[in-house]
Amino acid sequence: MIFAAGFGTRMKDLTKMQPKPMIPVAGRPLIDHTLDLVRAVNPQRIVVNLHYRPEPLLQHLQGCKVQTIVEQPDILDTGGGLRNALPLLGEGPVFTTNSDAIWSGGNPLQMIADAWRPDDMDALLMCVPTPNAIGHTGTGDFKMDADGRLSRGPGVVYGGVQIIKTSLLETFPEKVFSLNILWDKMHAARRLFGICYPGRWCDVGHPDGIALAEGLLETRDV
């Protein structure tokens, strides 16, 4: 599941006429960089959700062997959006990824697939140490203990890639909700885990992130 429905308000004028995943980085739309990572792990199916100005993205994805689902009339947030896409995704744990980051240092989806332990985990999040989080100014989203269990607090940044079980999504009565409340349930059951990305990651959620991401890509290619 690729999340691509957001309004991209931090991008200001760049998203007045197009959704954020269509903003070019190093000559390619942001979403194409994400699709490269996704396709490399050969998932059974790829689903992209859309809401804000979906037409350019729908046109771009034609013939790309992905399924799209447009959230109408309301945007459903990450939890509601994932639950809405389950008829297309099928049963079982799924990868989810945001579409506004650039990674340098290996495929994060393959890394979490290799570390996934379904007997112990309900979700496994790819996290980034703050010194390696390019363009991110916060102190982190989670603390990680020696076993990889996550709890709220400063420490590591959630990079937007995870494997997550979807059965608990049906327990929420709200139509619109964030995956954060699902993570809180998993944390309470001691089944929310993370691993640290060994490379660098760039947030492209704001205009300054474009140049930072392009610089990261140039460094990766050297």
Image (spheres, helix red, strand yellow):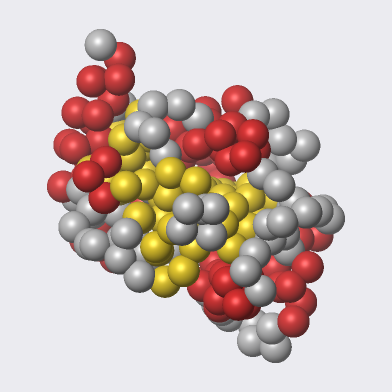
The extreme bottom residue here reads: 173
Residue 72 versus residue 17 in the image, above or below:
below
Q: Position of residue 16 (x, y in %)?
A: 28, 59
Q: Horizontal placement of 210 versus 196: left or right?
A: left
Q: Horizontal placement of 206 versus 70: left or right?
A: left
Q: Position of residue 212 (x, y in %)?
A: 19, 37
**Looking at the figure, which quarter contains the C terminus?**
top left
Write the residue at 58% across / 71% down. Answer: 187
Residue 197 versus residue 120 in the image, above or below:
above
Write the residue at 75% across / 51% down. Answer: 118
Q: Position of residue 165 (x, y in %)?
A: 72, 59
Write the residue at 42% across / 39% down. Answer: 197
Q: Nearer the viewer, residue 22 or 175?
A: 175
The extreme top residue here reads: 222
Q: Position of residue 178 (x, y in %)?
A: 53, 74
Write the residue at 69% across / 83% down. Answer: 172
Q: Nearer the viewer, residue 165 or 206?
A: 165
Q: Quadrant of residue 45?
A: top right
Q: Quadrant of residue 10?
A: bottom left
